[in-house]
Image (spheres, rainbow, N blue to C red):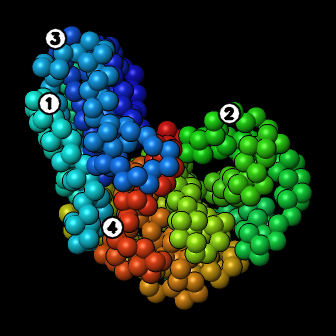
Amino acid sequence: MGTQIVPSGSFVVGKKSEQSLVAHLGSCVGLTLVDRQSGVGGLHHILLPSPTGADTVFEPATYATTGVPLFLEKICSSGAAEERLEAIIGGGALVGPVSELDMVLNVGGRTAEAVQSFLEREGIMVLRSETGGFFGCKISLDLHSLETRLDPMLQEEGEVDAHHEILSPSEVEEAIRNVQPIPQIALKIIMMIQEDDYDMEDVAREVRQDQVISAKVIRLCNSAMIGLRSGVDSIDRALIALGEKRLLRLVVSATVETMFPESARGYSLCKGGIFQHALGTALVAGELAAFTGLSRPDVVYTAGLIHDIGMIPLDQYVAASAPFFYRNMKETQRGICELEKERLGVTHPETGALLGEEWELPPNLVDTIRYHHEPAAAEVDLELVTLVYLADLIMSRFRVGQGLVSTDGQALEENLRRVGLRPDQFPELVERIPRNVFQAAHLA
Ligand SMILES: [Fe+2]
Ligand SMILES: [Fe+2]
């Protein structure tokens, strides 16, 4: 049976078929509507409760208040009768460790409420509504049976606590040594960005000479997350479509990608999940820099790209005790670093900082790696670290691709203020992120 992923901010309607529609929900809300008699069903993946006006490219399906009416219209025009519709609602979780502010903002909860009240007004029967909670879920609609399933996004129960090892300092060192060195071209670009002194010809020459990297850059240009409208088939075209600086960002991203593990067993729940998280965080961080006018967007982008590199050497160890991590984060709501400390004896920020020093990355980037879960402790560039912290938080709240990447939200308010933002601007901030950054989850 085929599976069609429904990205956030969109809906899919279908007739009886062997297909199923699936959405992975964190703070997002999933709504299925079915009419058994006519055999029509659909799934809507909703990101936010209602528009605030900051959405520059207004996409109505993103919101409950503007999207659900369109979804309803579509399903009725596909042959369903409104009076026979049955609805099931899921998602709207507070993902990760939750602060009081999260409770107050409760974006997911408000989205679910907006969906509920619309259905109520329309007199549509809600068979089941499982929203809220602290962990993401998968909603799927089988278009053959027209049944909706809600499955918690947990790994297999049962294989708990299979493995438990505290790493000694020499084991950590060895794990770091086993990471392949950062590609020279990545380092070169990072330094160019750092020093604000660009030699594009030099980079272009190197990229053209390296088949693997050019192919990767082109693939990245055409990926859902970057979302270029026209197809790119050469570095020259990429340069035209993106301009020098954006192309440079993609080159550094593509080279960094080669270093991330592809497994779906450790920190990430899907193949390539850690890199997807890194790229998404970089894109969001760059937006935040532009939005706040603090720090240079390109520097913030690279910091976002590499903030979790400590996961590279630790991934294999986390894979061994992944179910423990999932269960514990869910049950005790403890942060990832606390669990790493308990389980492995080291955290990914600590390990990443060591790796960054080994590569001789600039001090502000090592600072970001070391303190991105506790920005107040930053030693070199408080604003940079805070921007990456916020980008990381936005990525982990609104995408569920990587279950273990969750940021401690206790200090969200304080951190927003540090970069000159009010907590009530948070939803607006989320809204400014290009939609495809969220939509690309699981697909890339
Ligand atoms: Fe992290
Ligand atoms: Fe992260």
- Residue 79 appears anywhere in the view: yes
Tell me, for residue 230, which label it has, or none: 2
Q: What residue is pinned by disc 3?
A: 37
Q: Which residue is painted at 53% across and 71% down in the image?
A: 292
Q: Give the quarter of the figure containing the N terminus.
A: top left
Q: In whole angstroms, how far apart are the C-alphas of marks 2 and 4?
A: 36 Å
Q: Give the quarter of the figure containing the C terminus.
A: top right
**Residue flagged by tag 2: what amino acid is it?**
Ser
Name the spot of residue 289 as percent of width and height, x first: 57, 68
Q: In whole angstroms, how far apart are the C-alphas of marks 1 and 2?
A: 40 Å
Upstream in the sequence, badge 1 or badge 2?
A: 1
Upstream in the sequence, badge 4 or badge 1?
A: 1
**Residue flagged by tag 4: what amino acid is it?**
Asp
Name the spot of residue 100 as percent of width and height, x first: 23, 72
Q: Element type at marker 4?
A: helix
Q: Which residue is painted at 41% across and 79% down in the image?
A: 417
Upstream in the sequence, badge 3 or badge 2?
A: 3
Q: What residue is pinned by disc 1?
A: 122
Q: What residue is pinned by disc 4?
A: 424
In front of the other: label 1 or label 3?
1
